[in-house]
Structures are given as C-alpha cells and as structure tokens.
Amino acid sequence: MSNKPVGFAKVLKKGKNNKAYWYKVGALFPTKNAKVHRLVLDALPVDGVLYLTEAENDKDDTETPAPKDIEG
C-alpha cells in the first residue's frame, strides 16, 4: 500500500477573468483491496460536486485552469 495519492478530489469554481479553475480539496489513496480507495478531504464543496482526477501529470499547485470541455 502506497502513501502516494492515485488521484485528487477537486472542485470547479469561477476564478480570474470568469474562467473555470480546479481547486484541490482532497486526495485519493489506494488500500490493500484494489477495488477500494480511501478519499481524504480537506474541504467540502459548497455545491456538493466533487471531481476525481488521476494523479498522473498532476501539478503540485492547488489552483489550475480547468479544461474547456469541463467548464460549466
């Protein structure tokens, strides 16, 4: 079992210039059971919507621009 996250929980919010940005609010960790993951949240979304993203190629910064096809 690894201490490295396999994914992140993010919220999508409007930021600078009314563009959509991801904000990390948690991390997804593997468990001994490969079909189960542990989600550790630092915050809860106000609108109740979380996006789970893979950790691959994820930047370390908390705020990143969201892809155009995700913007609401």
Image: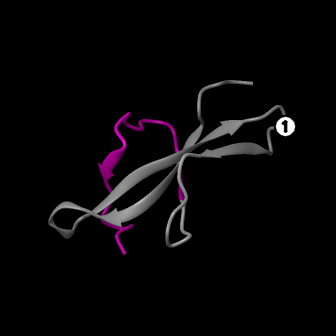
How far from the left and from the top, in percent, is residue 47? 50, 73
Q: Secondary structure at mark 1?
A: loop
Looking at the image, residue 47 sits to the left or right of residue 30; the answer is left
Quadrant of residue 15 within the rendered picture: bottom left
Q: Is residue 4 above or below residue 72?
A: above
Camera-side residue of 57 and 19: 19
Looking at the image, residue 39 sits to the left or right of residue 15; the answer is right
Q: Quadrant of the C terminus?
A: bottom left
How far from the left and from the top, in percent, is residue 43? 53, 52
Name, please, the residue furthest toward the left: 17
Residue for point 55% across, 59% down: 44
Q: Main secondary structure of the magenta part?
A: loop
Name the residue that disc number 1 marks. Answer: 33
Q: Quadrant of the N terminus?
A: top right
Q: Which residues are magenta?
A: 51-72
Residue for point 39% across, 67% down: 70
Give the amino acid at mark 1.
Answer: Asn
